[in-house]
Amino acid sequence: MRIRTPSFFARFSCLGSHCHDNCCLGWEIDIDPDTAAFYRQVPGPFGDRLRRCIGEENGLFFFLLDEEERCPFLDRKNLCEIYQVLGKEHLCQICRDHPRFCGIFGPVCETGPGLCCEAAGRLLLENEDPLTLLEEETDDSGRGVSPGEELSPAEEQRRLLLEKWRPTAFSILQDRSQPLPQRIATLLQKGLSWQEELDGEPVSLPDQPPEPGAFVPGLLTLLGCCESLGPAWDRALKALQAGWREGKLQAALPDFRRALPSMAGYEKLLCYSLFRFWFRPVFDCDLLSVLQQSLLCIQTVFLLDLCRFAGSGRCTLSDRIDTAKLWSKEMEYSDENLSLLQEVFLSNPVLSVPAQLTFLPFL
């Protein structure tokens, strides 16, 4: 199997109690069946506590969060008591893996840390070096990765096409002789031709050009319709909506552009998102939504950064890591919200490819 990772993955490690956030706060933490069976057999007072703190619904097991929405085994130093008492090998699957993701597509496994983790965000954004991918050939036992289901002939054909196209996508986005908006426009045009090749027919786009200025209000409406995954996102979205409605973001834009060291961080976020979701069309044949979703990522993060700048007059690296983390928690880790994006891209002209292109002069 070929294992493919972002180049910074080898340097990734959990910050533990030094993290400003925590993976064990505000999330429903599911327990896989094998681990739940083990926890039922743990003896003594710790085993009794384990069983009191596990809920079950329709045969699915999960930790019962406390009144602060903390995992009941997260101590006051924000360290895991299960890890300390039983060892890493007895964490449930999601706790062993998170925030790492893993996608298996036939003979290829793509894995890395998600941007919901501030350590991952810092590794991605701490410098302006283009994002690169590393690949190694390995047997399954060496990395704990098992082969996925065998792809159908049609799925394998799509995988091969996607393998061929992504280096071109990265090459377009990382050509810093061109301004980032021009690179994005070029990639979207290329993406339309790739989608037509996958579909065997032309892509249907809105007959009428989008109204100037309609995209951002449409985007903010969409974000308000998404499932909220935490109060930090709710506060940020409320400030963003108010800032746009009152014209504060538009007024702050020239100073924000001057304050940004470069657009490299947004380029890297785009490339990260394309790495994260690029092979989804192996199964659903929808490459265009991957491109639109990735662009929506940097459009939203750019607006969140601008909103912070409008409020404080600054947007530091830590601020930009935090806004990327907000987006990741809300979208990257929510299948429900990602599905909603796909539906809206197909059905709402205000968020179509031509509409997204109207935002590019804003970047």
Image (spheres, rainbow, N blue to C red):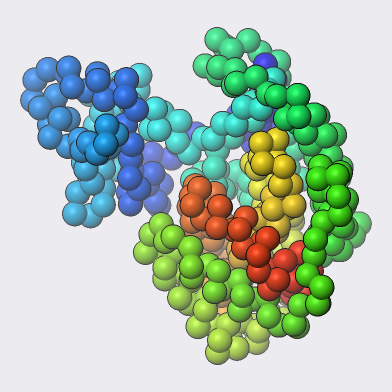
Q: Nearer the viewer, residue 86 or 26?
A: 26
Q: Residue 222 at x, y = what percent?
A: 55, 69
- Give the vertical position of 140 relative to 161 (above or below): above
Residue positioned 38% across, 32% down in the render: 95
- Give the vertical position of 344 relative to 286 (above or below): below
Q: Nearer the viewer, residue 238 or 59?
A: 59
User: How many labels, in total?
Assistant: 0
Which residue reaches farthest bottom?
246
Which residue reaches farthest right?
177
Q: Is residue 176 visible?
A: no
Residue positioned 42% across, 71% down in the render: 235
50 relative to 116 in the view: left or right = left
25 relative to 347 in the view: left or right = left
261 relative to 90 in the view: left or right = right
Q: Residue 230 at x, y = what percent?
A: 38, 59
Q: Is residue 64 visible?
A: yes
Picture quarter with the N terminus: top right
Residue positioned 69% across, 53% down in the render: 289
- Give the vertical position of 140 relative to 19 (above or below): above
46 relative to 23 in the view: left or right = left
Residue 62 figure quarter? top left
Residue positioned 51% across, 35% down in the render: 100
Q: Nearer the viewer, residue 201 or 295?
A: 201
Residue 141 figure quarter? top right
Q: Residue 65 at x, y = what percent?
A: 23, 46
Picture quarter with the C terminus: bottom right
Residue 55 figure quarter? top left
